[in-house]
Image (cartoon, grey):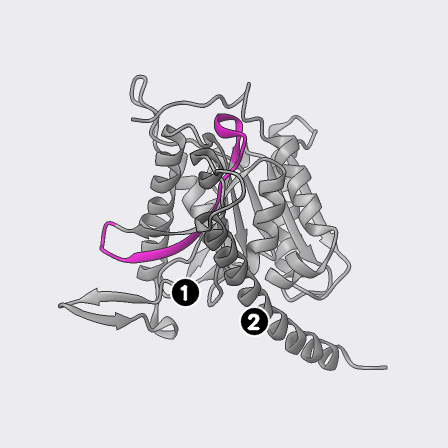
Amino acid sequence: MRSMAATLKTENAQVQSRRIFSGLVFLAAIAVAVVASAQPAAKPKTKADAKLKPRPVTLKTKDGINLRAFYFPSAKGKEAITVMVVHEWEGSASPYYKLAMELRGAGCAVLVPDYRGHGGSTEYVAAGKTQSFNVPQMGKFDIQNIILRDLETAKGFLKDENDEENLNLNAMVVIGIREGCVMAAHWAARDWSFPSIGSKKQGQDVKALVLISPEKQIKSISLDQGLNSPAIMQLPIMVVAGKESPEAGEANRIIKRVEGLKKRAGGGTVSKFEGKMVGTALSGPSLVNDVSEVIPAIVKFLTTEVDAVTDNPWIKRD
Protein backbone atom coordinates (compact mmCIF):
# COMPACT_ATOMS: atom_id res chain seq x y z
CA MET A 1 0.00 0.00 0.00
CA ARG A 2 1.35 3.40 -0.90
CA SER A 3 1.99 5.82 1.93
CA MET A 4 -0.03 9.03 2.27
CA ALA A 5 3.13 11.05 1.54
CA ALA A 6 3.73 9.16 -1.68
CA THR A 7 0.09 9.54 -2.69
CA LEU A 8 0.13 13.28 -2.02
CA LYS A 9 3.42 13.65 -3.92
CA THR A 10 1.91 11.96 -6.96
CA GLU A 11 -1.28 14.00 -6.66
CA ASN A 12 0.68 17.24 -6.33
CA ALA A 13 2.62 16.48 -9.51
CA GLN A 14 -0.63 15.75 -11.29
CA VAL A 15 -2.17 18.92 -9.84
CA GLN A 16 0.72 21.06 -11.13
CA SER A 17 0.37 19.62 -14.63
CA ARG A 18 -3.39 20.16 -14.57
CA ARG A 19 -2.93 23.73 -13.30
CA ILE A 20 -0.61 24.61 -16.19
CA PHE A 21 -2.94 22.96 -18.68
CA SER A 22 -5.97 24.66 -17.11
CA GLY A 23 -4.31 28.06 -17.41
CA LEU A 24 -3.54 27.50 -21.08
CA VAL A 25 -7.12 26.34 -21.71
CA PHE A 26 -8.47 29.42 -19.90
CA LEU A 27 -6.41 31.88 -21.93
CA ALA A 28 -7.09 30.04 -25.18
CA ALA A 29 -10.83 30.00 -24.52
CA ILE A 30 -10.89 33.72 -23.78
CA ALA A 31 -8.84 34.41 -26.90
CA VAL A 32 -11.22 32.35 -29.03
CA ALA A 33 -14.20 34.22 -27.60
CA VAL A 34 -12.62 37.61 -28.26
CA VAL A 35 -11.49 36.71 -31.79
CA ALA A 36 -14.85 35.20 -32.62
CA SER A 37 -16.61 38.40 -31.62
CA ALA A 38 -14.39 40.35 -34.02
CA GLN A 39 -14.82 38.04 -37.02
CA PRO A 40 -17.48 38.62 -39.67
CA ALA A 41 -20.33 36.12 -39.42
CA ALA A 42 -23.11 34.96 -41.67
CA LYS A 43 -25.59 36.91 -39.56
CA PRO A 44 -24.89 40.44 -38.33
CA LYS A 45 -23.96 40.58 -34.67
CA THR A 46 -25.69 43.10 -32.45
CA LYS A 47 -24.09 45.11 -29.66
CA ALA A 48 -25.97 42.89 -27.22
CA ASP A 49 -24.26 39.80 -28.68
CA ALA A 50 -20.82 41.37 -28.40
CA LYS A 51 -21.19 42.51 -24.80
CA LEU A 52 -22.07 38.97 -23.69
CA LYS A 53 -18.72 37.55 -24.83
CA PRO A 54 -16.33 36.52 -22.01
CA ARG A 55 -13.39 38.86 -22.22
CA PRO A 56 -10.20 40.05 -20.51
CA VAL A 57 -10.39 43.51 -18.94
CA THR A 58 -7.79 45.83 -17.41
CA LEU A 59 -8.51 47.40 -14.04
CA LYS A 60 -6.43 50.33 -12.77
CA THR A 61 -6.10 50.73 -9.02
CA LYS A 62 -5.87 54.05 -7.18
CA ASP A 63 -2.16 53.49 -6.65
CA GLY A 64 -1.61 53.02 -10.38
CA ILE A 65 -1.38 49.22 -10.71
CA ASN A 66 -2.86 47.69 -13.86
CA LEU A 67 -4.66 44.46 -12.99
CA ARG A 68 -5.70 41.84 -15.49
CA ALA A 69 -9.12 40.32 -14.93
CA PHE A 70 -11.51 38.09 -16.85
CA TYR A 71 -15.16 39.03 -17.11
CA PHE A 72 -18.01 36.67 -17.93
CA PRO A 73 -21.15 38.73 -18.62
CA SER A 74 -24.67 37.46 -18.01
CA ALA A 75 -27.64 37.55 -20.33
CA LYS A 76 -29.93 38.21 -17.34
CA GLY A 77 -28.98 41.88 -17.03
CA LYS A 78 -30.39 43.53 -13.90
CA GLU A 79 -31.46 40.13 -12.53
CA ALA A 80 -27.96 38.61 -12.69
CA ILE A 81 -26.28 37.53 -9.46
CA THR A 82 -22.78 39.05 -9.41
CA VAL A 83 -19.83 36.82 -8.48
CA MET A 84 -16.23 37.80 -7.76
CA VAL A 85 -13.63 35.03 -7.42
CA VAL A 86 -10.54 35.66 -5.25
CA HIS A 87 -7.84 33.14 -6.18
CA GLU A 88 -5.18 31.59 -3.93
CA TRP A 89 -1.79 33.10 -3.10
CA GLU A 90 0.81 32.37 -5.82
CA GLY A 91 -2.09 31.40 -8.06
CA SER A 92 -4.05 33.19 -10.77
CA ALA A 93 -7.46 33.55 -12.36
CA SER A 94 -6.59 31.00 -15.05
CA PRO A 95 -7.80 27.77 -13.35
CA TYR A 96 -11.29 29.13 -12.77
CA TYR A 97 -12.58 29.25 -16.34
CA LYS A 98 -14.75 26.16 -15.80
CA LEU A 99 -16.25 27.54 -12.58
CA ALA A 100 -16.90 30.93 -14.19
CA MET A 101 -18.58 29.38 -17.23
CA GLU A 102 -20.83 27.18 -15.09
CA LEU A 103 -21.86 30.17 -13.01
CA ARG A 104 -22.44 32.18 -16.17
CA GLY A 105 -24.57 29.33 -17.50
CA ALA A 106 -26.69 29.64 -14.36
CA GLY A 107 -27.24 33.34 -15.11
CA CYS A 108 -24.49 34.89 -13.00
CA ALA A 109 -22.11 37.66 -14.08
CA VAL A 110 -18.59 36.67 -13.00
CA LEU A 111 -15.34 38.61 -12.54
CA VAL A 112 -12.05 36.81 -11.81
CA PRO A 113 -9.22 39.30 -11.18
CA ASP A 114 -5.49 38.59 -10.98
CA TYR A 115 -4.56 40.68 -7.95
CA ARG A 116 -1.16 42.41 -7.75
CA GLY A 117 1.90 40.21 -8.15
CA HIS A 118 -0.08 37.36 -9.69
CA GLY A 119 -1.15 36.05 -13.09
CA GLY A 120 -1.23 38.92 -15.56
CA SER A 121 -0.77 41.56 -12.84
CA THR A 122 2.92 41.08 -12.08
CA GLU A 123 4.32 44.44 -13.20
CA TYR A 124 4.03 48.04 -12.07
CA VAL A 125 5.68 51.35 -12.93
CA ALA A 126 7.82 53.16 -10.34
CA ALA A 127 10.01 56.20 -11.04
CA GLY A 128 9.19 55.83 -14.72
CA LYS A 129 10.49 52.26 -14.87
CA THR A 130 8.58 49.02 -15.25
CA GLN A 131 9.28 46.69 -12.36
CA SER A 132 8.01 43.29 -11.26
CA PHE A 133 6.48 42.34 -7.93
CA ASN A 134 8.62 40.00 -5.85
CA VAL A 135 5.91 37.71 -4.48
CA PRO A 136 8.10 35.94 -1.85
CA GLN A 137 8.91 39.36 -0.39
CA MET A 138 5.34 40.63 -0.37
CA GLY A 139 3.97 40.99 3.15
CA LYS A 140 1.06 42.18 5.27
CA PHE A 141 1.02 45.64 3.68
CA ASP A 142 0.60 44.07 0.23
CA ILE A 143 -2.29 41.89 1.43
CA GLN A 144 -3.95 45.01 2.79
CA ASN A 145 -3.46 46.70 -0.58
CA ILE A 146 -5.05 43.74 -2.33
CA ILE A 147 -8.08 44.03 -0.03
CA LEU A 148 -8.35 47.82 0.04
CA ARG A 149 -7.30 48.59 -3.53
CA ASP A 150 -7.40 45.58 -5.86
CA LEU A 151 -10.69 44.05 -4.76
CA GLU A 152 -12.24 47.48 -4.37
CA THR A 153 -11.15 48.35 -7.92
CA ALA A 154 -12.74 45.13 -9.11
CA LYS A 155 -15.97 46.19 -7.44
CA GLY A 156 -15.70 49.56 -9.19
CA PHE A 157 -15.73 47.77 -12.53
CA LEU A 158 -18.79 45.79 -11.44
CA LYS A 159 -20.47 48.99 -10.28
CA ASP A 160 -20.11 50.44 -13.77
CA GLU A 161 -21.59 47.23 -15.21
CA ASN A 162 -24.42 47.53 -12.70
CA ASP A 163 -25.24 51.06 -13.80
CA GLU A 164 -25.31 49.90 -17.41
CA GLU A 165 -27.93 47.36 -16.26
CA ASN A 166 -25.71 44.39 -17.10
CA LEU A 167 -25.81 42.84 -13.60
CA ASN A 168 -27.17 43.31 -10.09
CA LEU A 169 -24.38 44.43 -7.75
CA ASN A 170 -26.83 44.37 -4.85
CA ALA A 171 -26.83 40.55 -5.17
CA MET A 172 -23.09 39.94 -4.96
CA VAL A 173 -21.30 36.72 -3.97
CA VAL A 174 -17.59 36.48 -3.15
CA ILE A 175 -15.79 33.15 -3.63
CA GLY A 176 -12.37 32.73 -2.01
CA ILE A 177 -9.89 29.90 -2.61
CA ARG A 178 -7.24 28.97 -0.03
CA GLU A 179 -5.56 32.22 1.07
CA GLY A 180 -8.12 34.01 -1.11
CA CYS A 181 -10.67 33.07 1.58
CA VAL A 182 -8.88 35.37 4.02
CA MET A 183 -8.92 38.29 1.58
CA ALA A 184 -12.49 37.58 0.49
CA ALA A 185 -13.78 37.53 4.08
CA HIS A 186 -11.94 40.74 5.02
CA TRP A 187 -13.15 42.53 1.91
CA ALA A 188 -16.75 41.36 2.46
CA ALA A 189 -16.60 42.62 6.06
CA ARG A 190 -15.26 45.93 4.80
CA ASP A 191 -18.05 46.13 2.23
CA TRP A 192 -20.58 45.79 5.03
CA SER A 193 -18.90 48.57 7.04
CA PHE A 194 -20.17 51.23 4.61
CA PRO A 195 -23.71 52.36 5.46
CA SER A 196 -25.96 53.94 2.89
CA ILE A 197 -26.18 57.74 2.95
CA GLY A 198 -29.75 58.76 2.34
CA SER A 199 -30.77 57.15 -0.93
CA LYS A 200 -27.15 56.57 -1.99
CA LYS A 201 -25.99 53.01 -1.56
CA GLN A 202 -22.27 52.70 -0.76
CA GLY A 203 -21.77 49.08 0.29
CA GLN A 204 -23.52 46.12 1.88
CA ASP A 205 -23.63 44.43 -1.51
CA VAL A 206 -22.12 41.06 -0.57
CA LYS A 207 -25.01 38.67 -0.01
CA ALA A 208 -23.13 35.35 0.30
CA LEU A 209 -19.62 34.04 0.91
CA VAL A 210 -18.06 30.79 -0.38
CA LEU A 211 -14.80 29.53 1.15
CA ILE A 212 -12.97 26.81 -0.79
CA SER A 213 -10.07 24.98 0.92
CA PRO A 214 -9.78 27.81 3.48
CA GLU A 215 -6.37 28.67 4.91
CA LYS A 216 -6.14 29.99 8.48
CA GLN A 217 -4.15 33.11 7.62
CA ILE A 218 -1.85 34.85 5.20
CA LYS A 219 1.00 37.18 6.22
CA SER A 220 -0.38 37.39 9.79
CA ILE A 221 -3.87 38.40 8.60
CA SER A 222 -6.30 35.73 9.79
CA LEU A 223 -9.53 34.38 8.38
CA ASP A 224 -11.16 34.65 11.81
CA GLN A 225 -10.64 38.42 11.80
CA GLY A 226 -12.79 38.68 8.70
CA LEU A 227 -15.41 36.26 9.95
CA ASN A 228 -15.73 38.14 13.27
CA SER A 229 -17.99 40.69 11.59
CA PRO A 230 -21.60 40.17 12.80
CA ALA A 231 -22.80 41.22 9.34
CA ILE A 232 -20.83 38.40 7.69
CA MET A 233 -22.28 35.82 10.06
CA GLN A 234 -25.76 36.84 8.93
CA LEU A 235 -24.94 36.02 5.31
CA PRO A 236 -25.29 32.64 3.61
CA ILE A 237 -21.90 30.94 3.95
CA MET A 238 -20.58 27.81 2.25
CA VAL A 239 -17.35 26.01 3.16
CA VAL A 240 -15.92 23.39 0.78
CA ALA A 241 -12.80 21.26 1.30
CA GLY A 242 -11.34 17.80 0.74
CA LYS A 243 -11.55 15.46 3.71
CA GLU A 244 -7.93 14.34 3.26
CA SER A 245 -6.59 17.69 2.04
CA PRO A 246 -4.08 19.87 3.93
CA GLU A 247 -6.90 22.36 4.62
CA ALA A 248 -9.30 19.78 6.10
CA GLY A 249 -8.54 20.70 9.71
CA GLU A 250 -9.07 24.41 9.15
CA ALA A 251 -12.22 23.78 7.10
CA ASN A 252 -13.73 21.62 9.85
CA ARG A 253 -12.86 24.25 12.44
CA ILE A 254 -14.52 26.99 10.41
CA ILE A 255 -17.57 24.79 9.79
CA LYS A 256 -18.02 24.15 13.54
CA ARG A 257 -17.47 27.83 14.34
CA VAL A 258 -19.95 29.14 11.78
CA GLU A 259 -22.53 26.48 12.65
CA GLY A 260 -22.26 27.40 16.33
CA LEU A 261 -22.64 31.12 15.70
CA LYS A 262 -25.56 30.63 13.34
CA LYS A 263 -27.22 28.21 15.74
CA ARG A 264 -27.07 30.73 18.58
CA ALA A 265 -28.33 33.51 16.33
CA GLY A 266 -31.13 31.29 15.02
CA GLY A 267 -32.38 30.13 18.41
CA GLY A 268 -31.08 26.60 17.92
CA THR A 269 -31.62 26.42 14.16
CA VAL A 270 -28.82 26.66 11.59
CA SER A 271 -29.80 28.30 8.31
CA LYS A 272 -28.00 29.89 5.37
CA PHE A 273 -25.03 27.59 5.78
CA GLU A 274 -23.50 24.57 4.06
CA GLY A 275 -20.34 22.75 5.06
CA LYS A 276 -19.27 20.34 2.35
CA MET A 277 -16.35 18.00 3.02
CA VAL A 278 -15.55 15.93 -0.08
CA GLY A 279 -13.78 12.57 -0.07
CA THR A 280 -10.49 13.65 -1.66
CA ALA A 281 -7.01 14.92 -0.85
CA LEU A 282 -7.28 17.56 -3.57
CA SER A 283 -7.60 21.22 -2.69
CA GLY A 284 -7.87 24.68 -4.25
CA PRO A 285 -8.19 24.77 -8.04
CA SER A 286 -7.82 20.98 -8.31
CA LEU A 287 -10.74 20.47 -5.92
CA VAL A 288 -12.83 22.84 -8.01
CA ASN A 289 -11.94 21.41 -11.40
CA ASP A 290 -11.36 17.71 -10.76
CA VAL A 291 -14.09 16.74 -8.30
CA SER A 292 -17.30 16.65 -10.30
CA GLU A 293 -19.68 17.44 -7.44
CA VAL A 294 -18.02 20.67 -6.32
CA ILE A 295 -19.00 23.18 -9.02
CA PRO A 296 -22.66 22.05 -9.18
CA ALA A 297 -22.87 22.33 -5.38
CA ILE A 298 -21.50 25.88 -5.47
CA VAL A 299 -23.86 26.89 -8.27
CA LYS A 300 -26.84 25.39 -6.42
CA PHE A 301 -25.91 27.12 -3.16
CA LEU A 302 -25.57 30.53 -4.82
CA THR A 303 -28.72 30.36 -6.88
CA THR A 304 -30.74 29.00 -3.95
CA GLU A 305 -29.53 31.39 -1.25
CA VAL A 306 -29.23 34.64 -3.23
CA ASP A 307 -32.23 36.29 -4.82
CA ALA A 308 -31.35 38.99 -7.33
CA VAL A 309 -34.92 40.11 -7.95
CA THR A 310 -37.13 40.46 -4.86
CA ASP A 311 -34.87 40.30 -1.79
CA ASN A 312 -31.96 42.18 -3.36
CA PRO A 313 -33.40 44.39 -6.11
CA TRP A 314 -31.20 46.22 -8.61
CA ILE A 315 -30.20 49.73 -7.53
CA LYS A 316 -28.51 52.36 -9.69
CA ARG A 317 -25.35 53.73 -8.06
CA ASP A 318 -24.45 56.93 -9.97
* Residues shaded magenta: 62-81
Residue 89, percent across and down?
Answer: 47, 64
Side of 275 where 231 appears, left or right: left
Q: Identify the residue at image location x=42%, y=31%.
A: 204
Q: Is residue 215 above or below residue 6?
A: above
Side of 179 where 122 appears, left or right: left
* Magenta span includes 223: no
Q: Which residue is mark 1?
A: 118
Residue 129, percent across and down?
Answer: 18, 71
Identify which amino acid the numbered label 2 is placed on: Ile
Q: How many marks?
A: 2
Which label's residue is closer to the chain start, 2 or 1?
2
Tag nearer the camera, 2 or 1 = 2
Q: Which residue is mark 2?
A: 20
Residue 160, percent across and down?
Answer: 35, 35
Q: Is residue 10 above or below residue 124?
A: below
Q: Is residue 27 visible?
A: yes
Kindly give the residue lying farthest to the right in the view shown: 1
Q: Secondary structure at mark 2?
A: helix
Q: Are marks 2 and 1 in contact (CB under 8 Å)?
A: no
Q: Identify the residue at image location x=63%, y=46%.
A: 102
The quadrant of the rendering that contains the N terminus is bottom right
